[in-house]
Image: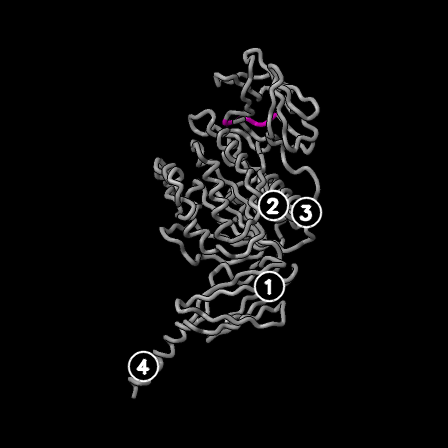
Amino acid sequence: MNKILFFIVVMIFSNAIWANVSLPNIFSDNMVLQRNSEIKIWGWGNPKEEIKITPSWKNQEYKVTTDSYANWQITIPTPKEGGPFSITFKGYNEVVLKNILIGEVWLCSGQSNMEMSAAWGIENGDEEVKNANYPNIRFFTVPKLTATTPQNNLLGNWTECSPETMKNFSAVAYFFAKQLQKDLKNVPIGLISSNWGGTSAEVWMPETAFKNEPDLLKATADYKPNEYCPVEPTRTFNAMINPIVGFKIAGTIWYQGESNVGSTIYDKTFSRLITSWRTLWKDDFPFYFVQIAPYQYGENHFGGAEVRDFQRRTLQLPKTEMVVTSDISPTDDIHPKDKKSVGIRLANLALNNHYKTRNELVNGPLFKDFKIEKNKVIVNFDYSDGLYFKDKKANQFEIAGVDGVFHQAKAEIKNNQVILQSKEVKNPTKVRFAWTNTAQSQLFNKANLPASTFISE
């Protein structure tokens, strides 16, 4: 009899374990869900188990049945911003998520300059930490993980912004959220921080991004092992991005590129990263990124300039915008301490282009085209209102003839165009600007934003 009772108890206990409705950790107390959207929620349970889902913001019960692989997913609508709310999931067991806010969710990714926190050391860090009481800003930090295959869950949980939590969270992302809230009238902001210092773009790309693109994979063959981070393609994507693919976001902010200095195809690599994420999310969400700062990147005198220009060229993709930081970054520090300005500039791009709460100049001058008039080069820029040189030397423009040899050009501004000429170049065919690793742009517009490095085709 005792054996029979023991068997029954074991079976009941085993079935309870097997039957539990469970959710990936990205769905937890304190989370922010994207407002005015159809959001996907997913998880696990017993095969063919019916799960009833009841969000407190809507007097309606949603039902979903787990498939034969123990997976389930459902799409439910979210209202305008607000909260706190709860969601109840009821199958053989019950799970209740509490203190949920509805607002704007942004994925914040890249390498160390996105990862860098106040605890790491930022400008005015102690004061910023002391004042970081914003319970309507919520953080989710993805831990550093790698995997050889795509994963479906990761460790972590959502937390409210406080001095204790902000201190170790991405400073750029925090200042981005603060600036958004300033314009969006305290709409809740959710930030998912998934980054790893020293990583190349390739480790953040899914395997599908490399299909039929042998040159992208070939570019990683010469990457040397790094004692601080993985170098093999897809490793961080599999563990740190794939588990949250499908979690509804407003967009992505990105700060990476230093570890791709030396690449001759970074524009293609970076573009594939962006399009591959959008494909997996099935959403053409905004992707705003930070151009790498001026710094002496290794022995190649032009490697940093090349990556900055590749980043500029990526702007050909829709809904992409770029922050230029050469004016707020010293040339002797690969980790500039002014993260507040970076976060604010990223937020201004979002407010101007995505949220439409502003209608102002938020981009630095970007090379558009040029034309030749005799021995002069006339350069046109987008976002060129109020062009001026900050340094009277104005010595960062160079032009070249058919021999491809660049010579410094005399530059002057007329009607928001830059006019160039050089005694050494009688028949110019090419132009470039700020073409060294450490160049800090001398050219600005009326918004006091610097021009990007560029080289013409």
- Mark 4 or mark 3, whichever is nearer to me: 3
Q: Earlier in the sequence, mark 4 or mark 3?
A: 4
Give the spatial CA distance, label 3 vs label 1. 23 Å
Determine whether the residue tagged by mark 4 lies in a helix, strand or loop. helix
Q: Earlier in the sequence, mark 4 or mark 1?
A: 4
Along the viewing direction, whichever of 5 and 43 lies nearer the viewer: 43
Vertically, is 65 above or below 275? below
Residue tagged 4? 7
The residue at the point 61 percent across, 15 percent down is 374
Along the viewing direction, whichever of 269 and 83 lies nearer the viewer: 269
Along the viewing direction, whichever of 283 and 306 lies nearer the viewer: 283
Give the spatial CA distance, label 2 vs label 4. 57 Å
Residue 429 occupies quadrant: top right
Magenta stretch: residue 31 in it? Answer: no
Question: Can the viewer see residue 171?
Answer: no
Residue tagged 2? 175
The residue at the point 63 percent across, 56 percent down is 188
Which residue appears farthest toward the top when viewing the image?
423
Q: Earlier in the sequence, mark 3 or mark 1?
A: 1
Chief SS of the magenta region:
loop
Using a 10 Å C-alpha cutoff, classify the residue at mark 4 as few (fewer than 14 neighbours), some (14 to 19) or many (20 or more).
few
Vertically, is 377 above or below 186? above
Q: Earlier in the sequence, mark 2 or mark 4?
A: 4
Residue tagged 3? 356
Q: Position of residue 19 (x, y in %)?
A: 42, 73
The answer to whether 115 appears left or right of 187 in the picture is left
Disc 3 residue type (three-letter):
Lys
Q: Which residues are magenta?
A: 437-442
Disc 2 residue type (three-letter):
Phe
Disc 4 residue type (three-letter):
Phe
- Mark 3 or mark 2, whichever is nearer to me: 3
